[in-house]
Amino acid sequence: MLVPLDQAAALGRRRIGGKALGLARLMERGLPVPPGVVIPVRAFREFLQHNGLWKSAQRLGRIPDPQRGRALRAAVLAADLPPALAAALRAQVPALGPDLVVRSSGVDEDAGDQSFAGLFHTEIGVAPGDPLELAVKRCWASAFDDRVLAYANRADGRTRLRSHRREGPGMALVVQRLVRARVSGVIFSVNAMTGSWRQMTVEACWGLGEALVGGHVVPDHYLVRRPRRLPGALQRLAARLRLEPLERSVQAQERELVLGPRGVEWQAVPAVRRDSPKLNDDELLHLCRLALRAEAQGGGPQDVEWAMDARGETWLVQSRPITSPPAPDRSARTLWTRRFIGERWSEPATPLGWSLVRPLLEHFIAYPRTTAARLGGDPSLRLIDGAPYINATVFRHLSFKLPGLPPPRFMMDMLPPDEERAWLTRFGGAPGVRVYAAILKETFDERRWRRFRWNPFTNHRSWEALEKLLVREVPRQVTPPPAATDPVRALERARAGMELARAYVKVHVTSLLFANLWYQVVEGMLAVLLGPGSERVAGEVLRCPEWNLTILTHHDLWQLAQRARELDADLSEVPAPGTPFADVFEAFIERHGHRSDASWEIMSPRWAEHPERVLALLRHSVDAGEADPRVRARELSAQGDRALAALLARIDDPVRRAGVRYLVQLTRRYLLLRENQRYHFDRLLFAVKRNYLVIGRWAVQQGALACAEDVRFLEADQVESLVAGRLEPQRARAEADRRGARFARQLERSPPDFLVDGQPVLAEKAGRRLTGLGTSPGVARGPVRVVADLEGAQRLRPGEILVARAVDPGWTPLFPVIEGLVLELGSQLSHGAVVAREYELPMVVNVRGATTLLEDGVEVVVDGARGLVWVHD
């Protein structure tokens, strides 16, 4: 009924489970593993049969039922161990020592495509005898936990718990001597965060490792350059010659998990160790060599848990394959995503706004022939329950990974987490050549480059010409006076505005592309020139110039707040005309009143229409006592110039130096375009909206709408038909009322980030460590404040972590008083990311469900470099 761990490897996974098999094989290779025994799968099944629970367990595996699961777990805990097993435990286990750890070893656990990580129960600090027998039953009972069965039978069309369905439930257990760890942690033998197989990562914390894997502490993080993949003997030699520490991030740790007199408990970390690195270079490299040996034994990248005792002796307590989902999905199933587009529609799209913008965007991004032939035939854009989605199926085919190198980041942002992980954890992968070829053919057949200002070296000059046109023409698109009700004239002006919008998108789409392109080119160039630490230098030299219009807007708002303080103005309500503060307030609204929370939604509320939003920002600025944002931006811009000068001084070759200067300045220019283009586009769309509101006021007089704002619930062709007399007012009224009621319901919903064939891609249950994309480096700790919109911003307090669905330019006045940001949507060069880097705020985006997983007041640590958020008690 018990098998010594060092003799168990020959029994195989079906008999001793994945975790025990991995540890047994490590022992065979001479790696340091704490001694122990395995309680094989046969003992578990005999226990169930001995107590009449076998059929219940089989039934639960086939048909998961929470109520039956609770009953079965209770029955397992109340049952008796088979006499032979109980006798073997009492006879053989005490030799391991007085302190034991009991770990699960499921038959399907720690496999290459599923890990069951953290789902089964582990008992730490168990004494032999009765406590051990109870611990064994607790671990066995966890095989029937609701979350285990849900993970095993995930709703993705595949049966996960394979052995359970064929043979019945199977779980072995590993009973080992507990390592009283001084320091412990985890090693990934490749960098699973970036997809680089030339790096490995190490995390370390004081005390027992359960504090780290459970997400209770923020660990030290070490990045190490590793040798290329080699045969076993050569790999071991290369590990001694070519391991090189690249980065280290040391985190203060105030408490540690230890085995005390009352069992496992939290204790304060002694002051002498609290701020110290957990590992020195010799210890770090020794751990990495052990991990590479574990990788050679496992046949692929490994996730290794380790512990180092007070004597400095190192032990491996687990080694499992880094979970890799199946190969990237290139089936015909359509993938829809809110990434990128969700930042621009943070609320449901209105029928009018979407019907105007959708054809505009499709003209530039749709490839109907390629989509019909290779990608399932669905449109490039779709409105699903009020939420705009992009058809991201093409990115499954365009994505690629050069051997051992990270895949293109902007492509990974468009894929669900499982598919992204499939790319990051594989060694390499080719793109879908047929789709690339089809896109190129359609591009050349239709001369599609004529639709864009496509030249990456001159696109910014095209914008300069268009900017002058917008400054001149947009004021002419507004129908004076505000009370005008001439629908024909207003419709003409709205059409003219949308033609300007087409000219804008012609430049803007490629400006976005080139900003990403040049940013990645400069990052890669600096990585070659500088090696370790190049990311920090890139962040310093690639600063958006301080005269960008977002910073200028914030500066004007700050000046308005100073004026309010001087006048002791009442900021609880809009100032009455004729009061000293009213003139400066109205001037600000006149200049910046076109700003909104959702920049691509034409009918989005604007500051000019809801000045109470500006008042909330003013109250926030006055309460925080913030400094002039333009002064800060100017200092950071100067810091970037000094960093660039220092970088150029390190380059001897004058040709290379000139090339670096040119590329950095070009990238800065495109970062500036991202901010300034959005500002002018907001103004243009507000002019279009005001013309449609003119039509709305006229429609109210005709009995076609209940109020002018309800024009947003008609589509553009319906508005034209109404103005031309082809749509009866009563029918228009009924349609607007119906859609308005549906829109109100949509406001209460939170759309999923991804859909496959119309079904949400469900996230796995989050633990204490949330993952996303790090877009602004730094580490910040503070309480969470979940903010749904700018109206809720007045609840934000200095020092808090802002958590939101997405942020647009109107949110940036909140940045000076917060410590960091966590967003559900975003990208490396999204508006929020660019501005967060200007304010040196740690920021993590693409954190699924952040606004529901995190609650006000919860303490978190945000690591903006690695894209991690730790949630504390």
Image: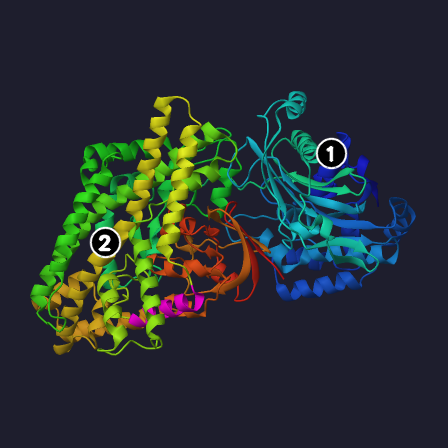
Residue identifier under label 2 = 680
Report whether 818 appears left or right of 618: right
Q: Quadrant of residue 568?
A: bottom left
Q: Position of residue 268 (x, y in %)?
A: 73, 57
Report whether 629 appears left or right of 321: left
> Type of residue at label 2?
His
Residue sitting farthest toward the right? 91
Report whether 107 appears left or right of 629: right
Q: Position of residue 784 (x, y in %)?
A: 52, 63
Q: Quadrant of residue 409?
A: top left
Give the camera-side residue of 503 and 609.
Answer: 609
- Residue at 81 percent of width and 61 percent of height: 79
Magenta residue span: 611-625
Q: Nearer the viewer, mark 1 or mark 2?
A: 2
Q: Position of residue 643 (x, y in %)?
A: 42, 37
Residue identifier under label 1 = 25
- Residue neighbourhood size for the residue with mark 2, other residues' Cα within 10 Å, grouped as few (<14), some (14–19), many (≥20): some
Marks 1/2: CA distance?
A: 63 Å
- Residue at 30 percent of width and 45 percent of height: 672
Report whether 255 appears left or right of 556: right
- Residue at 26 percent of width and 54 percent of height: 679
